[in-house]
Image: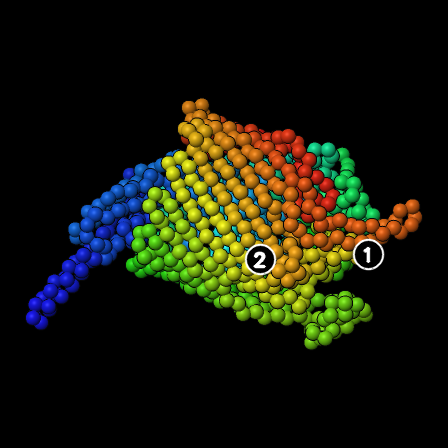
Amino acid sequence: MQTKIYIVFCFCLFCTISFAQNTVSGKITTQGGMPLSGSHIHIGTKTVSSDVSGNYSIKKLPAGNIKVFVSYVGFKSVDTLVNISGDQVLNFSLKENTDQLQEVVVRQKANTLNKSILEQKIKTETIEKFSNQTLGDILKEIAGVSSLKTGSSVVKPVINGLFGSRVPVINNNVRLEDQEWGTEHAPNFDVNAAGKITVIKGASGLQYGGDAVGGLVVIEPVAVKRDTLFGKTILNLASNGRGGSVSTSLHKGNDKGWSWNALGTFKYSGDKEAPDYVLSNSGNREANFSGDVKFTGKKYDISGYYSFYNTTIGILSASHTGNVNDLYNSITNKIPSVVNDFTYTIKNPKQKVQHHLAKLNYNYYFDETASLAVQYSFQFNKRLEFDVRRGDFNDIAALDLELTTHAINVDYKKALHDWTLKTGFNSSIQNNFANPATGIKPLIPNFDRIEFGTYGIASYDLSDSFSVDAGVRYDFSRVDATKFYLKSRWEERGYATVFADFIVGEQGNQWLTKPSFTFHNISASTGFHKEFEADLNWYSNISLATRNPNPSEFFSDGLHHSTGIIELGDLALDKEQAIKLSTTLQKKWNTFSVEVNPFINSIRNFMFLRPVGFETTIRGAFPVWEYQQTNARLAGVDVQTHWKISKQWQHDFALAYVNGKDLTNKESLIDIPPLNLSNKIQFSKNEWHDLKLELKSEVVLRQNQFPDNNFTTNIVVNNELVPVLVDISTPPPAYQLLHFYSEMKFKTFGKTNATVAFSVQNILNTSYRDYLNRQRFFADEMGRNFQIQLKFNY
């Protein structure tokens, strides 16, 4: 009996081993025989990438019919069924897809390790359409992403109601360090340099940091295949601002391993115009360059990258009030206090910003399943803010900050059967220098910051239709600053007893202090992706994010000249911790698809800027905004649909709603986006030079949930002080905007294709004010804007 059992056991063991020990290998090439390094090969539940020679190998495959999928950007995919009955060699020659080269599928590389987050997709044509605008403008195309503005040129993304340092921007695998702390500092990035853009709603991108309380914006440049040469030039002319832009890029690769990219952009615009008046001193200039060079060896590649961003931005003259009367009258009368004739001249107040980014990368591929990446990056950000000053001081910046950052990243990735593992660490050293030559006490002091972080992420495919992922991250941070505080302010803020050990010296009516803070943080994320039959997908993720107070929240103490308000930080702020639960249902039919993404984000020690009154300086009387903390909850839903009505007609709909509550004070949070909806109808006719006609409706409802921060002050009326209520809380009315876009494509000469586009923003020239624009107290938004765009692909 025991002998029979032993024989049966050996037979089962033999069958099991034979069933799961098949190996499939081969080579992925072009039809011309060129190897395609980095091709995606998916066989059953196994996934690998081809090496630099195009070779791949997948082991331990079961016998029987199994699905094989092979893809590479710019080539037609292979999707077939193969019978596996032993070790086999499968070679594939992919056919180039010229249509696909004209489209960018937004796919963050790290999303293979965060499968519980639905990827967002933006086409290349959408990026090109916004060539003359900002990163914040283009990201609004994604449901749940809005924008916080200071005027028309300073735009930063808001994800599910959160912005600033809660939404890190990752440019070419480098976290942008560009003094993005304040509401009036836009990301220093040229949208024309984007090849891929991904928005991650939540803290799932742990390899980039654990402080993404709102989410991440991940930007990747155009990838160059080794055997290609192509370029692009985009010309824009805009009626509102009477300016435009030109952007040219060239991408080159060859069969000796070398490839390079180069891009240059120039923008020039005068004063923008509202429907009824000129928005005086709202012009802007921009001159940018970026480029990289890369060498690919047999088992490694090495690359260098450099970008330079240079901009001058005019700050609306009417937003700089010199006394309480001006602010009260602007709010009450709804008319700017300063309206001049159109001009290209940019006067004070204004911003001048330069940002340098350089990096070196080394990637080593042990085999098709394991790789090591090492990166060093350097950033230098110089910010100048000019106020209206007397005499020769008018040419001297009132704020002069230089932020220098050195960073090292090391990442290791390993694919093991159904597992994908990634781990690594990063370290950075940062210095901020506040130039004393301004003659004004700096808003942000000198400081040094040291950071170190390490993470581990794992994803596991339980089956072809079900996968899970999880990750954890630890971060260490230390900030040491040097700052003068007025003794009166020190006492007023209650620092005398709590932070007495920070005082190291005395100068007249000021204390010389050296604040120092150390933080140890843990962040984590976990979730799953389940694919049902009939194209139904369910994504679910829960994440823990931890964010330290940034330098602006800690140390702000004085007049912020770009917004005309006094900002006060708080040394007593504690770190912010958020737990976000997000789930997405995605359903696709033949002609219709829908995505529904509800979420809830519970944030302890939520930091925000609250208006608290007025303060008089030698420059005048200015509103005072103070950083405070509370416990908060943000909950909402994002909805997107796509309906292919017919061959020529299609419709897109998007809805985003966020409800923000201050749980401690039992009131609504400030600066939460109102409910907004967009409808876009599109007609296309390929036979008519790829004609495309598009009409978009954008509806933004009034924000009915807001805190009451109104205050009473005295203004001068008939040479007497009269108490008045300054209403800085009530949101503006709802509004609807209509936009039109059209384009046609033409074959010019050789392989050059030309696209002619004509668009109109705000067709009806509607007068409106945006609740999330810090200049809404002083002027309307931009009016109608006609734009002509010429695109040449060669």
Find residue 337 and report its horizontal and vertical position in percent.
79, 41
Mark 1 vs 2: CB contact within 8 A:
no
Quarter of the image for the C terminus: give it.
Answer: top left
Local secondary structure at mark 2 = strand
The type of residue carrying mark 1 is Thr
Q: Could you tell me which residue is drawn at 71 percent across and 66 percent down?
A: 483
Q: Secondary structure at mark 1?
A: strand
Q: Residue at x 41, y 61 (%)?
A: 470
Residue nearest the viewer, comparing 423 with 702: 702
Q: Does residue 653 appear in this view?
A: yes
Name the residue: 29% across, 53% down: 45
Q: Residue 65: image x %, image y %?
A: 21, 47
On residue 335, the disc is none
The residue identified by callout 1 is 616
Query: Which callout, 1 or 2, points at the residue further toward the start of the chain?
Result: 1
Q: Which residue is mark 2?
A: 633
Q: Decide which of 640, 776 is in the foreground and name it.
A: 640
Residue type, mark 2 in image: Arg
Tell me the CA gap for discs 1 and 2: 35 Å
Can you give x and y, in whole percent of width and height, for residue 37 in the image?
34, 48
The front one of 126 and 120 is 120
